[in-house]
Amino acid sequence: MRAGSTATGIGGDAALLGEALHRETNGNPFFVGEIVHLLAEGGLGTGWDPRRMPQGLREVIVRRLDRLGDGCRDVLHVAALVGDTISLQLLTEILDDPAAADHLARAVRDRIIVALEERAGALPASRTH
């Protein structure tokens, strides 16, 4: 890696990047966090270019969800209707999909949902959005 570059391919002054992020997101911490996730995942291409910046939170979240694939998004759509805590047993029964646990695990890895401590009958996850 060249001097001044990072794992996201963004080179240069961190202060300039911070100023650009603040300017583009109006300092909204949730929006900043989502943009940083996109940058880390390569969802904004290589390097920082404000012209490729999503125009709002909805677009940021849509871009992150698009990267999950259809199966995972389908499971998350149903999970969103179940409540704040996702019951894997209930979700599997509703969807009749043995891969539901794998899809939810992917969503946890991609930080779309957050793992919670184990509880009987519940997937240790809840929504972050």
Image: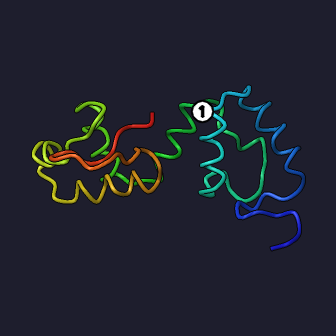
Residue 43 vertical position relative to residue 9 in the rendered view, above or below:
above
For label 1, the crowd category at 10 Å Cα-Cα, with few meaning under 14, some 14 to 19 and many 20 or more, is few
List the single residue furthest toward the bottom. 1
Where residue 59 sits: x, y (%)?
A: 56, 35
Q: How many dots with numbers?
A: 1
The residue that appears at 24% across and 56% down in the rendered structure is 101
Task: Please report the residue visible at 44 percent of the width from the left and 57 percent of the height from the top.
Answer: 109
**x and y, in percent, of residue 110 in the image:** 47, 53
Picture coordinates of residue 54, whole percent (x, y): 65, 37
What type is the residue that disc 1 sits on?
Phe
Examine the image and state in which quarter residue 46 appears: bottom right
> Which quadrant: the C terminus?
top left
Q: Does dot 1 land on a helix, a strand or a loop?
A: helix
Nearer to the camera, 56 or 8: 8
Compared across the picture, whether 68 is left or right of 6 comes to left
Residue 7's image quarter? bottom right
Residue 74, image x, y percentages: 29, 45
User: At 77% from the left edge and 33% from the top edge, which residue is drawn?
Assistant: 22
Q: Which residue is mark 1?
A: 30
Q: Which colour style is shown?
A: rainbow
State the quadrant of the N terminus: bottom right
**72 vs 23: above or below:** below
